[in-house]
Amino acid sequence: MNLSELNDLWNTQRQQYKIWFDNLNKQAATLRNEVWEILQPTLKEWTSPENGPKRSYVELHDISEKPQPVSGLGLTSKSLTDMGELIFGIAITFEPAPNAFPKTTHYMPVAVRFINKAPQFSFFDKTSGRPDSKWEQDIKIFANTLVDEMIKHLSFNPLDGPRTSSRIGFL
């Protein structure tokens, strides 16, 4: 094989990686949309009094460093693990009233990967830096499980004793 043929292989692989990464981002956005559909917020957006950008009540967050909302460009390669999993957070904003501040945002760390061209979802353990061992292929089942985990987290009463470990992060 000569350099030209090797370069063609490299170009093909580069294009495949771009398609793969774009599809990981699409799956993350689709999961966010599934959670949105389950929760059906009465208002679509809220505006921060500090800097004024409109924010969604259910957002996709980059959690590769300091958790922050994902821009229109999507998640970056910083959000990839060495095993090819895309790590992100599904963030939900809570408030005492629609125009009340401060609002509180909680996020659930999540991973998505492709196995045999099919997406799989798992919760991500930020302490170990790895996804849970259980992966779910059905995005609707996973979205409902994510909401159930948030319900479980918000149902905790501190009078019952110490909280067991939680997957939920806070912003």
Image (cartoon, rainbow, N blue to C red):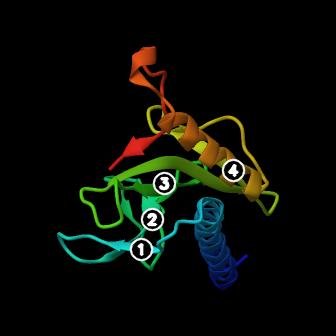
Between residue 107 and residue 76, name the one nearer to us. Answer: 107
Numbered tag placed on residue 61 in the rendering = none
For marks 3 and 2, the one nearer the N-term is: 2
Q: CA distance from mark 2 to mark 1?
A: 6 Å
For marks 3 and 4, the one nearer the N-term is: 3
Residues at discs 4 and 2 in contact (Cβ within 8 Å):
no
Residues at discs 2 and 1 in contact (Cβ within 8 Å):
yes
Residue at label 2? 57
Residue at label 1? 45
**Is residue 167 visible to us here?**
no
Q: Residue pushed farthest front? A: 97
Q: Residue pushed farthest top? A: 161
Graded by Cα atoms within 10 Å as few (under 14), some (14 to 19) or many (20 or more), the crowding at tag 4 reads some
Q: Amino acid at mark 3?
A: Gly
Q: Residue pushed farthest left? A: 50
Q: Amino acid at mark 4?
A: Asn
For marks 1 and 4, the one nearer the N-term is: 1
Q: Which dot, 3 or 4, sits closer to the camera?
A: 4
Q: Amino acid at mark 1?
A: Glu
Residue at label 4? 144
SS for callout 3: strand
Q: Which dot, 1 or 3, sits closer to the camera?
A: 1
For marks 1 and 3, the one nearer the N-term is: 1
Residue at label 3? 89
Between residue 167 and residue 130, name the one nearer to us. Answer: 167
For marks 4 and 2, the one nearer the N-term is: 2
From the viewer's perspective, is residue 68 above or below residue 14? above
86 left or right of 119 in image: left
Q: CA distance from mark 3 to mark 2?
A: 13 Å
8 left or right of 42 in image: right
